[in-house]
Image: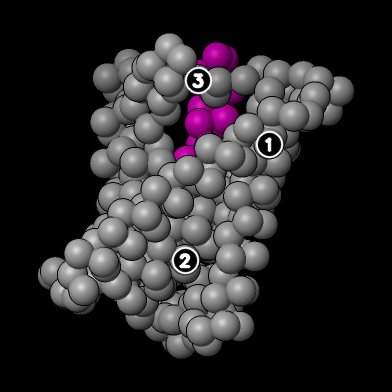
């Protein structure tokens, strides 16, 4: 039983990392030169739409067949709102502190694309509407629910469950870029640490509220705040 569950957990982890790679291959089938000449938002938007569609199909099948609850509802609204507001408060403080440090240490990096209205609206729109919803659907609603079924030990440190911990690790690993021909691996340690830490927070909110919607809001807020601040400072520091 333990060995079987371990194999299933490994398979689920592989699925969580491999389907987004397939989504990337799918997104490369299209030419976005007309609507997105700088490659700022179109490819990644199609990528996130495709991976979300695949997991929604899987989740709806499992929900119908095994009556699993993936949090397609608002759950405990009071708990969800409270955790979300606390997160907004402290992540805003963290963001301000981070950017102050980057500016003072002369390590701030400007927005990676030309600051055209098309790029700004497209990329912020992606961060607001697709990034959080797609990734929370996968790495919280699907991952934590499925991991919890097959992990015998349910809790590590309250309120962090083992399923939440493993989902956060896989979520962090999803931010590693690699290729096989030729083989290469690229990652940013600060990004991996931040993804892991945020993944734990999102996971706690998902389990306590019973809804995937609050982690989606938290994720979208954090992305828009970081990207929006980067864009604003990219303009301001050029003055």
Q: Earlier in the sequence, mark 1 or mark 3?
A: 1
Report the front residue among 145 and 96: 145
Q: Quadrant of the N terminus?
A: bottom left
Q: Is residue 194 above or below residue 108?
A: below
- Check disc 1: other Cα within 10 Å, few if <14, some if 14-19, many if 20+: some
Q: Earlier in the sequence, mark 2 or mark 1?
A: 1
- Mark 2 is surrounded, within 10 Å at the Cα level, by few (under 14), some (14 to 19) or many (20 or more) other residues, namely many
What residue is rendered at 32% in x and 16% in y?
Answer: 106
Q: Nearer the viewer, residue 215 or 15?
A: 15
Instruction: Say above or below: 27 vs 78.
Output: above
For label 2, the SS is helix
Residue, disc 3: 110
Pointer 2 or 3: first along the chain:
3
Give me the residue at 35% from left, 22% from top: 185
Q: Quadrant of residue 238?
A: top right
- The residue that mark 2 highlights is 142
Q: Which residues are magenta?
A: 225-239
Give the Cα distance between marks 2 and 3.
Answer: 35 Å
Q: Residue at the spot x=34%, y=49% of the render?
A: 170
Give how far across and how far down residue 149 sits, in percent: 33, 76
On residue 26, which mark appears? 1
**Crowding at label 3, few (<14), some or many (≥20) Cα neighbours within 10 Å?**
some
| Residue 38 drawn at (x, y percent) | 71, 19
């Amino acid at each position: 039983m333990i060995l079987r569950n371990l194999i299933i957990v490994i398979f689920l982890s592989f699925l969580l990392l491999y389907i987004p790679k397939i989504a990337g291959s799918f997104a490369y089938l299209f030419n976005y030169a007309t609507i997105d000449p700088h490659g700022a938002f179109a490819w990644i938007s199609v990528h996130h739409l495709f991976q979300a569609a695949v997991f929604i199909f899987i989740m709806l099948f499992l929900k119908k067949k095994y009556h699993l609850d993936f949090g397609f509802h608002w759950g405990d609204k009071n708990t969800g709102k409270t955790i979300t507001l606390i997160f907004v408060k402290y992540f805003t403080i963290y963001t301000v502190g981070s950017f102050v440090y980057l500016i003072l240490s002369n390590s701030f990096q400007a927005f990676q694309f030309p600051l055209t209205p098309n790029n700004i609206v497209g990329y912020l729109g992606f961060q607001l509407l697709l990034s959080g919803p797609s990734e929370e659907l996968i790495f919280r609603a699907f991952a934590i629910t499925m991991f919890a079924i097959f992990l015998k030990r349910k809790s590590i440190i309250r309120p962090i469950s083992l399923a939440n911990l493993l989902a956060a690790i896989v979520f962090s690993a999803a931010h590693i870029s690699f290729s096989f021909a030729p083989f290469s691996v690229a990652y940013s340690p600060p990004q991996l640490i931040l993804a892991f830490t945020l993944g734990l927070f999102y996971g706690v909110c998902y389990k306590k509220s019973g809804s995937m919607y609050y982690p989606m809001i938290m994720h979208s807020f954090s992305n828009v705040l970081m990207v929006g601040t980067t864009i604003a400072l990219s303009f301001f520091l050029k003055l």
